Structures are given as C-alpha cells and as structure tokens.
Image: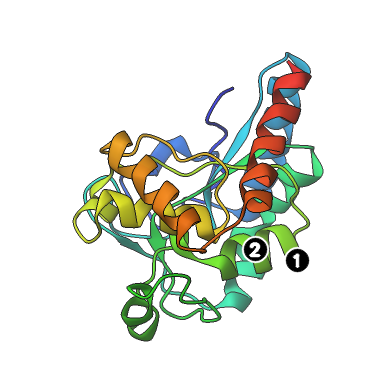
Amino acid sequence: MNLAPVADIWSNPENAVIGNRAFGNTADVVATRVAETVRGLQDSGILATLKHFPGHGDTYEDSHYQLAFHNHDINRFWAQEALPFISGIEAGVTAVMPGHISTPQVGGHSALLPWMQPWIDSGNLPVTFSDFWLQTILRGEMGFEGLIITDGLEMRALTDHFTCGQIALGAFLAGADILLIPANPAEAFQALLDGYHNGYFDMERLNESVRRILLLKELL
C-alpha cells in the first residue's frame, strides 16, 4: 500500500504543507493525474490511498502541528475539492485518508461522543470525527465502499486538543477502518474496548472494518 496520491488542489500558494505534493492548482489537472496515478499503482499491485479528504489544498495551517481550517461551504466542495476524489474513486481506488481539517462553514455532524458537541457548536469539529463527511458524503453521496484510513493520529492537530483515547474512539465511530499511528496504542485499544462495552458500537460495526481490511489483503 502507498499512502498516495495526494488529491488536494494547491489553490492556496501560501499552503506549504501541501505545496508541490499536489499535482496542480486546478481541479481538472489534479483530477486527471490522480486517476492515472491510482490506475498505475493498482495495476502494479500497490493499493492506492487518496488524501487528504475533503481537501487540504486551500488551508494555511499544517495539520502536523495545528488544526487546519477549510473555510468554504459545501457547494464549493462539490465544485472543486470533490472532483479529484470523485475521479480517484471512479478509477477504483482502494482507500481514502481524511485530513485533520475543520470545515466551519459545513454542518450536519453528529455528536458521536459527548465531548464532540462543543466542537460542533463552534464549527471546529475535525473531519476525522465527522460522520457527516465520512458517512453522509464519502460513503453516501460519493459511493465509496473501500477502506477509510486516518491520517497519523499522533499529529498535533488532534493531540493538542484531545486524549489518545478520545481520538481513537472518535475516529472509529465516525467511520475509520484503520487508526494510523495513535500516540499511545495501549490507550487507543483500551478506549475502543471501553467503547464497545459501553455500547457505542457493536460487533457488526467492528466486523465491517475487519472485512474491508481482509478483502483488500485478498487483492494482493
């Protein structure tokens, strides 16, 4: 598996974290090159991963060090940021990686855990914890049925604000299948175990993620 290609559009030239990792600064250029990269990787037996959903290209912040903000509404998403992801999904990409990005102008998130409500009220809930972005948009309207793998959960966009346990359980409840690099794996595991015993999810939800992982392994 390669955690690539970057499907972000580098529409903000002051965005150093994406920069020339992106294929270009327009949706059509990026969408075309994303699709070809997905096909090239996967035709060679390498699973591809689109990132950073729903788009990290027009942000100023580096989510390795702080929470990033995408200050546009859902109509802008469909007109621009969505296009490379749609192109990659249509090319058969096996995985999508959400970014640690807040979208203050987009609502519809559920408070999957009690601590999420203030973040929803402020408009600052990271996409990592958003059932709206991962379930309603990515799986629902965009029809993606593959693997959702988080960006690194040790990144300060999250760890400056949330505990390792909150991060792991919140991302899983939002729809992530693989929790990448939790800062404290033991704490992350315990949070998931506690979440199961406290009724936040059932065995069928866990098995959904297990099945997606096993199905991809069968492709290799």
Farthest residue toward the left?
160
Which residue is at 44% across, 36% downward?
21
Residue on which disc 1 sits:
141
Which residue is at 32% across, 35% downward?
185
Say which quadrant the C terminus sits in. Answer: top right
Which residue is at 41% across, 73% downward?
71
Tell me if residue 22 can be seen. yes
Does residue 8 lie above or below 41 as drawn?
Answer: below
Camera-side mark, 1 or 2: 2
Residue on which disc 2 sits:
135
Report the front residue among 133 and 197: 197
- What crowding class fits label 2: few (fewer than 14 Cα within 10 Å), some (14-19), or many (20 or more)? some
Q: How is the image coloured?
A: rainbow
> As shown in the figure, which amino acid type bears the numbered disc 2?
Gln
Report the front residue among 193 and 209: 193
Q: Is residue 84 left or right of residue 18?
A: right
Between the C-alphas of marks 1 and 2, the distance is 9 Å
Say which quadrant the N terminus sits in. Answer: top right
- What crowding class fits label 1: few (fewer than 14 Cα within 10 Å), some (14-19), or many (20 or more)? few
Residue 36 percent location from the top left of the image = 73, 31
Residue 128 percent location from the top left of the image = 45, 57
Report the front residue among 202 and 31: 202
